Amino acid sequence: MTNDPAGVQQFLSEQKKVLDQLLLEYARGTAAPSTVQESMVYSLNAGGKRIRPILLLAVLKGYGIPLQKGYRTAAAIEMIHTYSLIHDDLPAMDNDDLRRGKPTNHKVFGEAAAILAGDALLTASFQLLTDNQDLLPEQKMSTVKLIARAAGPSGMIYGQLLDMESEGKSLTIDELEWIHHRKTGDLLSVALESGAVIANAEQKDKEALSIFGKHLGLAFQIKDDLLDVEGDEAELGKPVGSDEVNEKSTYPQILGVKAAEDKLHFHLQEAKRCLAQLSMEPELLKGLTDYIGYRKS
Amino acid sequence: MTNDPAGVQQFLSEQKKVLDQLLLEYARGTAAPSTVQESMVYSLNAGGKRIRPILLLAVLKGYGIPLQKGYRTAAAIEMIHTYSLIHDDLPAMDNDDLRRGKPTNHKVFGEAAAILAGDALLTASFQLLTDNQDLLPEQKMSTVKLIARAAGPSGMIYGQLLDMESEGKSLTIDELEWIHHRKTGDLLSVALESGAVIANAEQKDKEALSIFGKHLGLAFQIKDDLLDVEGDEAELGKPVGSDEVNEKSTYPQILGVKAAEDKLHFHLQEAKRCLAQLSMEPELLKGLTDYIGYRKS
């Protein structure tokens, strides 16, 4: 008997495999010089969960649209996420030596290759967004516009700057939330919205999916913070308590563990309320919401 | 009496003024955090000649298309050029303290802000390309695709990597040319091709403009190298002989000054031959070719 009624685990593992493969294919297809190509492939291969592209694909599945239509857009968003991790880890930025238990990109390939690999992933992602014969020019245009805004200076880049500037400071919960909206939520929401664009969903669905994404993004971050306090090091693949060592403001640190858990549940419930408003089959997205909220790593 | 029959000087100075203004407007309109915004504005304001966007506008003028249609695309290309200068100057890359006689971006704003400002300009440029009501979705799509390819890992980024890797090595003229095609030529050509897309030019014109761009890009670079040997420091705003100090392979160093001058004239002539094939009024582009080939700085 399966304990996976909505097929969430199966969808996650199947689509992760497809995306892993496609990302390498796209990176190798860029005709980048070998140093940059190896550096891109290393970080694309570094064990990401592929949450953002899988959410996009889950939206398509909910609307009954062939997943084939969305793979390039999904992969492009994951490439942007990967570029942001490479640049964020640089010595001048967060100066991280390890990510998911592996040496960070610049530790392996040097800073110059890491900067260029990030630039290459970001630029190539926009080429990939336009290179999709299954979509209309208007649809591609909308995704380029939405994704550039979410990843750009008023979105993800804003979040990274504030995150760096806030290290060692104590933040209010509103300040912390604003950083997470920009740094994580905007790109996560835009993955869902891009799915809605590809599915030609109604405007009210696009808006509901965007709000769903904001709640999901916060739930994702709160769970991350909680795992850093209460998680199992073996399952996490990194030491617990690293946020405290790094003097990072977190939900449990500002609110306490109990109130942070309550907040996690609040956002999970709000996320599911958004799903109930959609003109689609929401079971898979509901299952992914639980996966994000109750994961062990 | 004017010595500017094709109106080249007037076009250059008028359009540079318009572009200077628009670039600041677009950068300020990104809603970037102030650190990143100031860092973007600093480099956008650092005295660039605006060659690439002016070439795009000159293509529109040649076809009798209102310049208004091309300003956003032109500015986006200049933002990409500016991002590449900021990242190329970083300590891990070319480690330059000065550009056009002014401190480089990271010397003023620090490395983190310089990396983020580069990322922001690159990402925002794609948003700007989609944000143009005067163009059809197909036209915007074409420019995003062409520009992402030219700026990406098989284009400008490839050139930058090879340029770094070749420092201190002696290159053959073919190797040097390949680097310049990627590092300078591809973005310069794509400015011209984007103009052709906006003007709905015929395919044969697009191809001729692309080849024109390749010759012009090489001519630009050879002239740069020659100015570094023979130029006037006061007019250049930088010391002559810096290529030799930096052990950079250049045309005069590989070929000698006389043969480098011959090569410059060859590419200027080939460029003009391409212009003769176009179904447009080529006088302005011809004048800009001479401006690039005979400039003093």
Image (spheres, coloured by chain):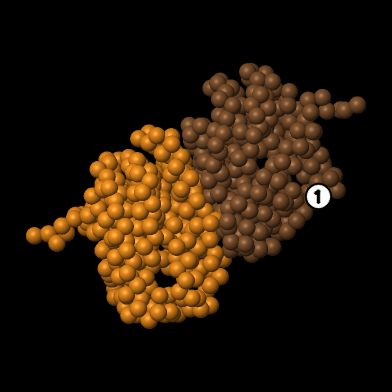
Chain colours: A orange, B brown
Question: Which residue is more in the foreground, B272 or B169?
Answer: B272
- The image quadrant where one finds the N terminus of chain A is bottom left
User: Residue at horizontal 59%, vertical 38%?
Assistant: B73
Label 1 Cα crowd, 10 Å radius (few <14 / some 14-19 / many 20+):
few
- The image quadrant where one finds the C terminus of chain A is bottom left
Residue on which the image places disc 1 = B237
Question: Which residue is more in the foreground, B258 or B204?
Answer: B204
Chain bearing tag 1 is B
> Where is A240 relative to B59, above or below?
below
Q: Residue furthest left?
A: A1
User: Residue at horizontal 38%, vertical 73%?
Assistant: A225
Which quadrant holds residue B72?
top right
Which quadrant holds residue B211?
top right
* Residue A261 point in image, percent of width and height: 32, 75
User: Residue at horizontal 45%, vertical 52%?
Assistant: A80
Residue A262 in view of the camera:
yes
Secondary structure, mark 1, is loop
> Where is B45 relative to B57, above or below?
below
Residue A40 in view of the camera:
no
Residue type at mark 1: give it.
Gly
